[in-house]
């Protein structure tokens, strides 16, 4: 029997693509979806922070058409950065024209110097590397964008998001996620020729009703029964048996785990000391998602806004009701605010919510007459994996150890890497194909 731990997108996709094979899905919560869930509160539909579908593969589009026919709406991104008192269209580096003139000059000069340093035929400069020969993220930012863009957006925003020294982060994840404009595009963007539709998130899909939670729910009619409230507590790889919090156990032939990799490793009995040491070095950040329902519509016309400056507690604010009008009652707006923190940190949720609402007032999104109809804070203990040198060096050894014991650790946290919802679905498909083969 193939045992799948976790009924998030990766786990459900694995089950879906296993077809008629003998498998069982166990989920610790009372419902499927993992972080790809939605809930209703006082007429507002909230997600476990913003989840948007960015599809790049034809297979994914066909699958979504089968699972959710006519239920997904297509959007062209409308996003911006709140910095220096203005809203700069995303991506910042290609749309400088709204900033104060002296800052535009500083960003342009810095970018031109960075381009010259990289491409000068007589004396091309090399990006500084660390002791392992890798380019730290901060050095990559400076070498690609120059000091101005780094100073006003790239460095403060990423320090706020990652809650760590950017010199400790590697840059092996940036190519697909951070748009790098040409010199012509940067100059044009400084003159008012907007470049708003750059990057992987330029277009996205979102359900017209029900929130993103309808996506995992759409898999359920096509998979075996999911066993809920089954909290994994221990794994014996030699015996091929797992235990749950109620004391019951199951034998398996192959194991697919979508729970955070560090938690899985912590449950494995007789874990080799070298793998245990690798586990201790894997790092991540957590996010508190503050969901707000406001008694006024049209608070913003943006899908989401980035906030790099430390004067605001959140790094991003998104608007559910701009993804789907049905996410809020008429004449109301539903928002999510994301605040990152290190896992060891204890949060006073009430204080964070109050600070977040004050931040919305300072940036002008909320007025003194606006009334917050409902508010909620969703804690996301595992939000983003930290891409550092330790992860790059040791993750392959961990995965090889698991696969040698017929364990597939997949999904955003099982694979211990950043991935989109499409990636999670495709990783479940790939795992199922390997197991079937």
Image: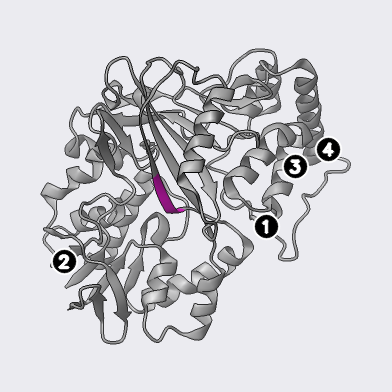
Measured Cα–Cα span from mark 1 to mark 3: 16 Å
Element class at badge 1: helix
According to the picture, the residue beneath numbered tag 1 turns out to be 168
Residue at horizontal 63 percent and vertical 63 percent from the top: 389
Few, some or many C-alpha atoms within 10 Å of disc 4 (few <14, some 14-19, many ≥20)? few
Task: Check the picture and name the quadrant holding the C terminus.
Answer: bottom left
Q: Position of residue 161 (x, y in %)?
A: 58, 44
Element class at badge 3: helix
According to the picture, the residue beneath numbered tag 3 turns out to be 143
Q: Specify the quadrant of the image occupied by residue 148.
A: top right
State yes or no: residue 238 in magenta. no
Q: Are marks 2 and 4 in contact (CB under 8 Å)?
A: no
Q: Are marks 3 and 4 in contact (CB under 8 Å)?
A: no
Question: How would you classify the magenta stretch by its main secondary structure?
Answer: strand
According to the picture, the residue beneath numbered tag 2 turns out to be 23
Residue at horizontal 47 percent and vertical 51 percent from the top: 418
Measured Cα–Cα span from mark 1 to mark 2: 41 Å
In this rendering, position of residue 40 left or right of residue 401:
left
| Magenta-drawn segment | 378-382
In the rendered image, the vertical position of residue 42 relative to residue 127, given as above or below: above
Residue at horizontal 21 percent and vertical 78 percent from the top: 247
Q: Are marks 1 and 2 in contact (CB under 8 Å)?
A: no
According to the picture, the residue beneath numbered tag 4 turns out to be 120
Q: Specify the quadrant of the image occupied by residue 227.
A: bottom left
User: Of circles 2 and 4, which is in front?
Assistant: 2
């Amino acid at each position: 029997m193939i045992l799948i731990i976790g009924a998030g997108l990766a786990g459900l996709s694995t089950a879906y693509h296993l077809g008629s094979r003998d498998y069982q899905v166990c989920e610790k919560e009372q419902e499927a979806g993992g972080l790809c869930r939605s809930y209703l509160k006082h007429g507002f539909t909230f997600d476990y922070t913003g989840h948007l579908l960015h599809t790049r593969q034809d297979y994914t589009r066909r699958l979504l058409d089968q699972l959710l026919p006519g239920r997904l709406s297509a959007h062209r991104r409308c996003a911006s950065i709140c910095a220096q008192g203005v809203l700069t269209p995303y991506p910042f580096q290609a749309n400088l024209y709204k900033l104060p003139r002296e800052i535009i000059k500083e960003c342009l000069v810095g970018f031109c110097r960075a381009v010259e340093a990289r491409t000068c035929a007589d004396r091309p400069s090399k990006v500084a590397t660390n002791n392992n020969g890798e380019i730290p993220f901060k050095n990559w930012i400076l070498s690609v964008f120059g000091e101005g863009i780094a100073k006003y957006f790239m460095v403060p925003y990423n320090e706020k998001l990652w809650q760590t020294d950017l010199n400790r982060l590697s840059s092996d994840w940036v190519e697909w996620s951070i748009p790098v404009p040409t010199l012509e595009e940067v100059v044009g963007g400084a003159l008012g020729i907007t470049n708003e539709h750059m990057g992987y998130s330029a277009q996205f899909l979102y359900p017209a009703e029900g929130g993103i939670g309808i996506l995992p729910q759409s898999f359920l009619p096509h998979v075996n029964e999911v066993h809920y409230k089954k909290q994994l507590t221990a794994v014996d790889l030699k015996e091929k048996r797992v235990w749950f919090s109620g004391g019951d156990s199951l034998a398996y032939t192959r194991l697919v785990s979508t729970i955070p990799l560090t938690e899985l490793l912590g449950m494995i009995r007789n874990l080799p000391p070298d793998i245990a040491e690798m586990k201790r070095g894997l790092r991540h950040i957590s996010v508190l998602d503050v969901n707000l329902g406001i008694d006024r519509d049209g608070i913003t016309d943006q899908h989401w806004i980035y906030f790099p400056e430390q004067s605001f507690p959140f790094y991003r604010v998104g608007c559910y009701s701009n993804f789907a009008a049905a996410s809020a009652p008429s004449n109301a707006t539903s928002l999510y605010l994301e605040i990152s923190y290190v896992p060891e940190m204890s949060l006073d949720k009430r204080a964070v919510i109050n600070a977040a609402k004050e931040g919305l007032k300072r940036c002008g999104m909320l007025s003194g007459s606006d009334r917050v109809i409902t508010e909620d804070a969703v804690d996301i203990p595992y939000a983003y994996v930290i891409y550092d040198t330790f992860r790059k060096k040791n993750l392959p050894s961990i995965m090889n150890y698991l696969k040698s014991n017929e364990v597939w650790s997949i999904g955003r946290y099982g694979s211990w890497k950043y991935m989109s919802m499409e990636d999670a679905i495709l990783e479940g498909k790939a795992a199922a194909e390997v197991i079937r083969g």
